[in-house]
Image: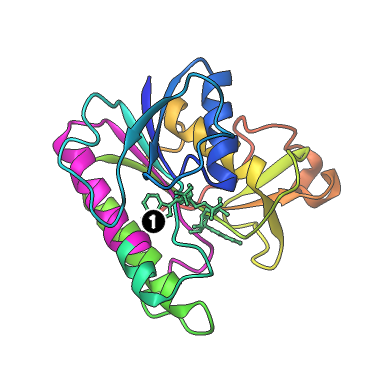
Amino acid sequence: MNILVAGATGKTGLHLVRELIDLGQNPTALVRESSDTSALPEGVDLRHGDLTNLQDGVCNGMDAVIFAAGSGGSTGPEMTDKVDRDGAKRLIDLAHAAGVKRFVMLSSVGADQAAPRGALAHYLKAKHEADEHLKTSGMTFSILRPVALTNDGRSAAVILGDKVDPSATASRADVAHVLADAAVSGRFDGIVQLLQSAQDMSDVQGGKHPNLSGTHDLLKE
Ligand SMILES: NC(=O)c1ccc[n+]([C@@H]2O[C@H](COP(=O)([O-])OP(=O)(O)OC[C@H]3O[C@@H](n4cnc5c(N)ncnc54)[C@H](OP(=O)(O)O)[C@@H]3O)[C@@H](O)[C@H]2O)c1
């Protein structure tokens, strides 16, 4: 599959591109002029585009699109609106216009609320609005909402759905693994779900989540 990855040069995105290659897929990295592409695997296709100003046709030829980008914590609310909300919405619209079959969104725990509170309220509202736009886009979608991200490697298991502890953590490697699986297999089509990494197998209800196959609780919205 030809899969466009927004945020491919990010900490999660780099894991994601490698996962897609391992699955035998053909990822294309959406990059800015200023992006440092040196950590991307050699030979990965690049497509230029800035989420604040995406050109028509940026999704042409793609079977799936994964949004793993974000404005980050060091910019203000204006960039949150431009990248995390409006950039995501524009990419969704362009993917739909290009006939893309599946759109996978890296969202966040807390983005289920239309009027979130607390320090992350502005960011979570932006993510919520992007998620809602995707759900009504007419495209097949999958939305993953991890808890706080870490740079740990793959864990023994992930927990998906309503058994997730919102105060737990999720490794970016685990998140990338599930994003890639969602894009390629379609097993999470139409599903919005939380994700955490299991620290050990005792975290996993019934002790039977050694991998991703059919063992998670799924939260449908
Ligand atoms: N941090 C958490 O605990 C947490 C929890 C749940 C969900 N999340 C979500 O996970 C996302 C990914 O996290 P991460 O740590 O992997 O992110 P990251 O390392 O900060 O990577 C962000 C990516 O977005 C790209 N990007 C930023 N602005 C862009 C623009 N205007 N146009 C095109 N690309 C742009 C960056 O490209 P450049 O290389 O050009 O900068 C980079 O590839 C976050 O943004 C957040 O929404 C985070």
Q: Callout 1: helix, strand or loop?
A: loop
Furthest residue toward bottom: 118
Q: Mark 1 Cα within 10 Å, few/some/many (few <14, many 20+)?
A: few
Is residue 102 a member of the stretch shown in magenta? Answer: yes
Residue 202 or residue 2, whichever sits in front: 2
Q: Three-letter amino acid code at disc 1?
A: Glu
Residue visible at 39% across and 41% down in the picture: 31
Which quadrant, please, contains the N terminus? top left
Give percent across and percent down for residue 126: 36, 68
Q: Nearer the viewer, residue 41 or 185?
A: 41
Residue name at image x 19 percent, y 39 percent = 96
Instruction: Tell me the residue at 53%/69% (across/down).
Output: 73
Give the side of residue 13 with respect to residue 196, left or right.
left
Task: Report the side of 125 relative to 166 (left or right).
Answer: left
Q: Is residue 1 magenta?
A: no
Chain part drawn in magenta: 83-112
**Is the residue at mark 1 in contact range of ligand 1, meaning its CB lies under 8 Å from it?**
no
- Percent across and percent down for residue 190 are 36, 43
**Residue 70 seen in this snapshot:** yes
Q: Nearer the viewer, residue 92 or 29?
A: 29
Residue in the picture at 78% in, 44% down: 206
Q: Name the spot of residue 198 as percent of width and height, x first.
A: 76, 48
The residue singled out by tag 1 in the image is: 221
- Above or below, 178 against 202 in this view is above
Compared to residue 54, the image places residue 52 above or below, namely: below
In the displayed structure, 128 sits above or below 89; it is below
Seen from the viewer's position, the closer of residues 3 and 83 is 83
